[in-house]
Image (spheres, rainbow, N blue to C red):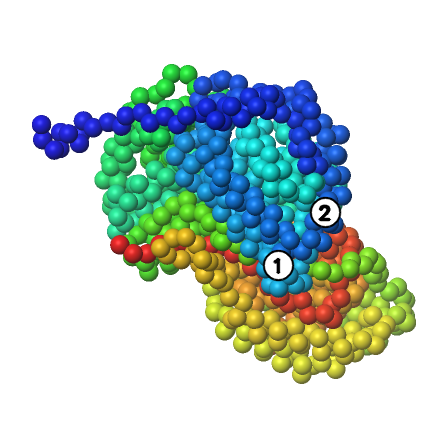
Amino acid sequence: MTIKEIFDTMDYGPAPESAAEALAWLVDQGSRFGHFINGEFTAPGDGFDSRNPATGEVLATLTQASQADVDAAVEAARKAQGGWAGLGGAGRAKYLYAIARLLQKHSRLFAVLETLDNGKPIRESRDIDIPLAQRHFYYHAGMAQLMNSELPDAEALGVCGQIIPWNFPLLMLAWKIAPAIAMGNTVVLKPAEYTSLTALLFADICRQAGLPRGVVNIVTGDGAVGGMITAADVDKIAFTGSTSVGRKIREATAGSGKALTLELGGKSPYIVFDDADIDSAIEGLVDAIWFNQGQVCCAGSRLLVQEGIADRFHTKLKARMDGLRVGNPLDKCIDVGAVVDPVQLDTISCMVAANRAGTMHQARVEMPEGGCFYPPTLIEGLSPADPLMQEEIFGPVLVSCTFRTPAEAVELANNTRYGLAATVWSENVNLALDMAPQLAAGVVWINGTNMFDAAAGFGGVRESGFGREGGWEGLAAYTRPKSKAKQLAKVDAFAGSGAPVDPLDRTAKLYVGGKQARPDGGYSQAIYGKSGALLGHAGLANRKDVRNAVEAAAGAGKWSKTTGHLRAQLLYYIGENLSARADEFAARIDAMTGKKGGAAEVGASIQRLFSAAAWADKYDGQVHGVPIHGVALAMKEPVGVIGALCADEAPLLGLVSVMAPAIAMGNRVVLVASEPFPLAATDFYQVLDTSDVPGGVVNILTGSHAELATPLAAHLNVDAVWSFSSSDLSASIEAASAGNLKRTWVNNGTAADWMQDRTKRFLQEATEIKNIWVPYGE
């Protein structure tokens, strides 16, 4: 027998992991669990079975939470929060370190229990999920230690409601709980109905660590329990799951004042160029799509391969698929385990069966009898519009199409409503790094895939959600600036019937695409001073004007690709031109508001422009210290098109404070000027005209905030909406934003001190962080 024949006939023998310890732990608990509330397990109640998806056997019976259970958990968290925050960062760090060490001590128990409950291969639970969960608690213990010195102006939000999915039960728990409690929050967490057991084991770990009562509370149940938590008296909701449920949560929390982060679905592109190391790219692809049976939100489920190597790549890929091992997840030689539940298995099967396009190859592997198993599947030759190229399957199914040029690859990759992750394979680092910024994704992996670490934030854009988990950027989701909120009073326009101040008619127009434009409806409103004298007229914009302004902003996309230095120069120029007309603007503001603060407001506006200009080329990203031979680059990118309802009480300063940081970061803006005092904004576009601002970068509308808020927030080409209006439009804006899950920043009827320079906060809201992982070496 030749060496080749020996290798061809070699097979893996079984290497089963014992489940005895995990099953014994379940038996010790009576195989029935209540909730973990205020540091104790409640008595088990009526509920549902948790089953092993590989065998169908019942592992334990869990309790379906009632409204009373959720209320008790929230009350316990609320009672504990003040003392937990008051403990200080160093005090909290000790508990997080203790939890991390206990996770290490019981790592094998967690790994086996996770595999029993979820169906993923034990190698993945043991080598990926559990170590990463430990890492998050160690990392955020350090964050707690540093909070007082590095985040002196930040404070905890309060009580956080957290809802996690079934694909990474313990890891998602760690992503949520570790940063929350590190920053002084307390939590009420609901694990997925299918996979709650490691969360309950974690509750036991919290007891062993001596964590104060009420800091961590865990309630089990179906989606209705998630709805109860969303509606409860909590200060933040953090959700990981499907886009459809995320949209419902956005609508349910609209106007509540609750902070919200969403990590949702994905249809991530896996781009292979013709100069790639094909064998390495195929091994990466195995991890990208068949890791955890494809039940991964960032799975590389859309293969885009360059046309010249497509046939060879697909041939090699099919051969590799036929060598995968599907079976008992507790066998350490298994590559693909069980799908989490019969319901999910049926969903995958139905989606694939409904497809009529392309050519399907299913791995020629021995499939287990019984259990929730689905064979690794490739469907090649699809068009970009085919349903399986657009819809998240959430199973071990890879779809494929080809491209010719890098530009076409970008178009295909971004041809999705999602934007969670992307992978690029190329030996040409210049090409790879040129591609990464062009991809609509929160994470880009170069010559690798599924790289995660607590030091590098993870999260998406578009309908993959908003917010980041991990890294410095992830702490923003669990902190807020220290401040005392004051209620914002509605600012009304003055009435009048007096003669005009200047008999020469001045009907100000809108400013759209760098040009003055008449309002579509043809109507205008009279603007009076405090004495009743007519100061002029301003146009009344409608939804068509919003459409035109957004279209102009979307068409000015080249602005986002300009350098920070260029944007800084333009902002300095705007400031200089405003300074030359300072007295005129001050008089206009005094006449509209009936006050004497115009000069101070103009002076502050000039300083805001200069501050934004100063930051334009200095608001840098980071290089995260991640455990790879390479780097993870946290790049700050513009959000895109930002719509903003400007402050009523500060007609010039409120507009400039929004505009300057936004365009400094490369965004384009649609600004709705102060409703009662719009003439400062209409005078200001004359300054923009003389400052060489490209058409479409800044667009200014005037009119009713209430009438313009919803069409602006609902527009699918708007990427973020901010509101500082004295009309509390927070609820309508947040509800309308659910259409494409755009980012929102609303005031919830609270006042802001516009004389205080908050440019840094505006810069944070005006940027998305994209983490680009770049391994290096041979």
Q: Residue at x 36, y 19 (%)?
A: 368
Q: Which residue is mark 1?
A: 147
- Crowd around label 1: few <14 · some 14–19 · many ≥20 (10 Å): many
Kind of residue indicated by mark 1: Met
For residue 355, what is the image quadrant? top left
Q: In the picture shown, does residue 532 fall above or below 374?
A: below
For residue 648, what is the image quadrant? bottom right
Q: Nearer the viewer, residue 389 or 181?
A: 181
Q: In the picture shown, does residue 77 fall above or below 552?
A: above
Q: In the picture shown, does residue 115 fall above or below 415?
A: above
For the view shown, which residue lies furthest in the left direction?
1
Q: Which residue is mark 2?
A: 81
Q: Give residue 231's position: percent from left, percent from top.
A: 72, 37
Q: Give residue 169's position: percent from left, percent from top.
A: 53, 35
- The secondary structure type at the circle numbered 2 is helix
How far apart marks 1 and 2 lie (CA) works out to 17 Å
For residue 309, what is the image quadrant? top left
Q: Give residue 763's position: percent from left, percent from top.
A: 60, 63
Q: Residue at x 51, y 23 (%)?
A: 24
| The C terminus lies in quadrant | bottom left
Q: Are marks 1 and 2 in contact (CB under 8 Å)?
A: no
- The secondary structure type at the circle numbered 1 is helix
